[in-house]
Image (spheres, grey):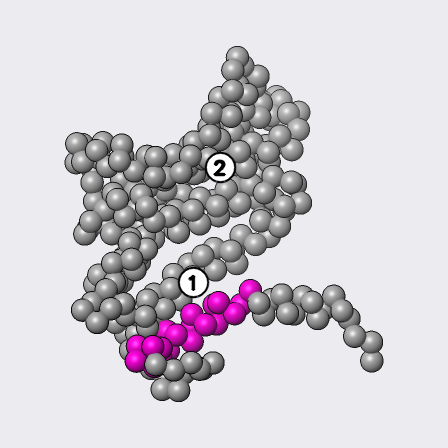
Amino acid sequence: MKINKSAIVMIFYILFLMLPIYWLINMSLKTNQEILSTFSLWPNDLTFDNYMVIFTDPSWYGGYLNSITYVVMNTVISVSVALPAAYAFSRYNFMGDKHLFFWLLTNRMAPPAVFALPFFQLYSSVGLFDTHIAVALAHTLFNVPLAVWILEGFMRGVPKEIDETAYIDGYSFFGFFRKIFMPLIASGIGVAAFFCFMFSWVELLLSRTLTSVDAKSIAATMTRTVSASGLDWGVLAAAGVLTIIPGALVIYFVRNHIAKGFALGRV
């Protein structure tokens, strides 16, 4: 029997990638005492109490609801703003277009810590502190440039003759954009939405700085989980497992779009 070395390497690589996830699940099914006292590859005393804490404590499941709320808001806003901007960059040449495009990308390159204090002061002064829209709008500073960059690459792949043919056939610009152009770049929209979702979901600094109670994210909740006896490792592990699920679902639904984005060289 001939052994496929590539398959063996791939299997070990996948096992190496899955090891942290398995260990996280393993810890989430243990008691805190077992986690700190013994080393085991599986739970000796299987328990689901850590998950029950999350599902019954408002501060925990509220964090998930808050995160999902502002992440969805940010994704919708970012993609909606990026679509017309990317169309302008892909179809028209105007003075300073390349410099403007580069400036947009520099916003994505800047660390969130640079904008944390200005956002805090701005939102506190206008009454948006500790609201979902505050975090959603703050994340657009980083997600809109990324979405514009991704969508512009997909739009350049659509011939301009399609635009002209649609206008000859009597389509208005909005009718052409909605009925013809957007279906042609559906993969690009899916890829842009995926990256906007993932950045906003895992971002911690801005979501922690701009919220306190009512809109506190799950990431911020996890960093503040400490008691008199120390960190509750089991609950943190359970929260980590549940945090992975939304991202995994998004990857599953847009996996084909992401693959096409890699094939086009824009992702």
Height in image: 65 above or below 157? Answer: below
Indicate the quadrant where residue 219 lies: bottom left
- Badge 2 element: helix
Height in image: 100 above or below 255? Answer: above
Marks 2/1: CA distance?
23 Å
* Magenta extent: 17-36
Q: Which mark is residue 245?
A: 1
What predominant SS class does the magenta segment belong to? helix
| Residue 179 seen in the current view | no
Disc count in the image? Answer: 2
Q: Nearer the viewer, residue 114 or 108?
A: 114
Indicate the quadrant where residue 243 lies: bottom left
Q: Which mark is residue 156?
A: none
Q: Amino acid at mark 1?
A: Ile
Q: Is residue 126 inside the magenta stretch?
A: no
User: Percent from the top left, x then y, of residue 20?
Assistant: 48, 67
Q: For the point 74% across and 66% down, which residue is it?
A: 6
The C terminus appears in which quarter of the rendering?
top right
Height in image: 14 above or below 81? Answer: below
Q: Nearer the viewer, residue 56 or 203?
A: 203
Q: Which mark is residue 147?
A: 2
Q: For the point 24% across and 52% down, which residue is it?
A: 216
User: Percent from the top left, x then y, of residue 108?
Assistant: 45, 35
Q: Amino acid at mark 2?
A: Ala
User: Percent from the top left, x then y, of residue 122?
Assistant: 22, 31
Indicate the quadrant where residue 261 lies: top right
Height in image: 195 above or below 114? Answer: below
Label 2: how many residues lie within 10 Å, few (<14), some (14-19) or many (20+)? many
Q: For the point 58% across and 49% down, which residue is it?
A: 258
Q: Nearer the viewer, residue 48 or 17?
A: 17
